[in-house]
Amino acid sequence: MNGAIATVGRDIGRILEALGGLMLVSLAVPLLWGEYYALPALLVSAIIPLGIGWLLYRRFKDAEAPSRFHGMIVAALGWFSVGLFGSLPFLLIAWSVQLGVSGFTTPAQTATLAAFTEPLNAVFESMSGFTGTGLTMTDNEEVLPRTLQWWRTFTEWVGGVGVIVLTTAILSRPGSGSLTLYESEARSEKIHPSIVSTVRTIWWIFILFTFVSILALWLAGMPIWGAINHGMTGLATGGFSITDNSIATYDSALIDFVLIPVMLLGSIAFPVHYLILRGDLRNFYSDLQTRWVFGYMSIGSALLWGFLYYAGPYGTPFAALRYGLFQFVSAATCTGFQTAVDSTNVALGRWPSYAQLTVTFGMFVGGAAGSTAGGIKLIRGLTLAKGIRYQIADVFYPETAVRRLQINGRRLNEDEASREFMEAAIIVVLWITFLVVGTFILLLTLPSGEYSLANVVFEVASAQGNVGLSSGITGPESLPTIGKIVFLFHMWIGRLEIIPVLVMLRTIFKRGGLYQ
Amino acid sequence: MKLDSLPVLSSVFEAGADDRIFDSLLLLGPLIIGLIIVLNRSLVTETLAIAYLGVFVVYILYRGVQ
């Protein structure tokens, strides 16, 4: 077991070093915006993970390469550590403003920033950012210091691709260890034979698309600071905003429609992007997941449009299309940008229950595996659907018949089909189990009668699918402490597709004698 | 000294789609955004942004039909 601690410790050390590096890079923001009072807090925030990471790495640098078991522990613990240490800028900047920093002029404290003086709120915001969820403990993002607006955006942008992918790209360690870690972060696709080349190409694509998204939003009328932040969080399918009412603040149909392809780009797998950039446009329809990204987004949006126009709150077909299309794409890509709010139209939480449940279904399925999106992933939904049809049709064939299950151009024999079907079924069953448990806990802890069952299921699915749309439950005051802890857990398991977290918890309980 | 032996440029050229147009767009992106921050919204910056997006979209289509 000591060997395991060394391997895990070494890789967690690398992840913490990378996190510290991100904070050091972010020092440019308070310098550019003249928020000098944030510099000491951000510097201290960087030094802590850097120091711990450096110590861990030096202590265990000769540890063995990680096995699959180590990889899962590193992924689960690494994401937890990043969420924890990533909260330091929120906590320390909020306290800097609260107490003042000698030698620096600090602005007046706001209720929004003061919420981060509570460590749990700061950890919630950080975990929500890195997991690309977008649920927030702020009640007015506009009054946050630019440094924290940036840090929220940056956490989502990095988290969208993955902290292990980041660590592998900048602190590369060629060999099988990198592949094991890469796969444990809910990824399996490879663009090149080398995993280091693969993650560097993923970052290359992601950075290029980020610039494209920023410029498209700016041309659509968004101010440049908003375009930078929303371009980054939109492409990362994160959904943090720098405005109080998310994208509804701009109240611009053009901005809404420009954001739709940005979110869709984020929900398509990186290997498909790579092939398209290489000139192979057939992948838009030949790749099963990409075809279904467009297919099920179209079907879901059309259904929602029907609900919102014929039986719902919108009076014109265009209004129903604008808000229905945007909200379904935002949910199904797991972005979480919101245009349906009361200040400009009708808030999501006040949509009819069946419309809310349609959006919830989008959050449940999510985008393509190998993209920045969350949910159970399209390929699992499709494997499950095809597998069920395959099992039922089996009754109609003679026992001696040799059958194949075709998924995404692969012809699977009976054993392979059973294995893939079982893997998909396990994730889906776990996903639904945790959704039900979370809903039950929230119903017990929320004030009775204040929220409907549809509201609660919606909110839990949003946290677990790393979406970030809210029916109004999440907030520093409205969500009880137990609810915040439960949501932290949901965001964490949702990002890692549950299994690595369960493996880590089992290991801890087993070592602690709680699990025999 | 060769262009692709410079530190940042070599990383950009080594990764990605092995295409100098896309590599150039990646390198020009921060410069255009920086110009927009400095010059705000003007005919020059809007033209540059439109040209950037135009080259990106048209070049993808061009490579697709090639």
Image: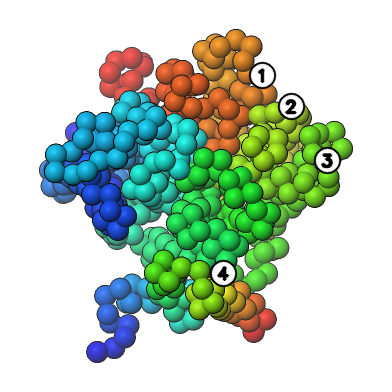
Please tell me if label 1 and label 4 are on a single chain.
Answer: yes
Q: Which residue is mark 1?
A: A452
In this rendering, which labeled residue sits more in front, label 3 or label 2?
3
Distance between the alpha carbons at the discs numbered 1 and 4: 45 Å
Residue A317, x across and y down, in percent = 83, 47
Tell me if I can see residue A308 in this picture: yes
Residue A505, labelled with which disc? none
Q: Amino acid at mark 3?
A: Gly
| Left or right of residue A171, residue A464 in this image | right
Q: CA distance from mark 3 to mark 2?
A: 18 Å
> Residue drawn at (57%, 66%), measured in percent from left and top?
A219
- Displayed quadrant of residue A42: top left
Inter-mark Cα distance, 1 to 3: 25 Å
Residue A114 or A335: which is nearer the viewer?
Answer: A114
Which chain hosts label 1?
A
Residue flagged by tag 2: what amino acid is it? Ser
Query: Could you tell whether A182 is left or right of B52 in the image?
Result: left
On whether disc 1 and disc 3 are found on a single subunit, the reply is: yes
Q: Is residue A74 toward the left or the right of residue A225 in the image? A: left
Q: Are marks 1 and 2 in contact (CB under 8 Å)?
A: yes
The residue tagged 3 is A315
Q: Position of residue B53 (x, y in %)?
A: 57, 73
Q: Are the residues under marks 4 and 2 on the same chain? A: yes
What x and y, as percent, mark residue A234?
53, 52
Q: Nearer the viewer, residue A278 or B30?
A: B30
Question: Compared to A426, does A217 lie above or below?
Answer: below
Distance of label 3 from label 4 (alpha carbons) = 43 Å
* Callout 4 amino acid: Leu
Which residue is tagged 4? Answer: A275
| Quadrant location, the C terminus of chain A | top left
Viewer-nearest of labels 3 and 4?
3
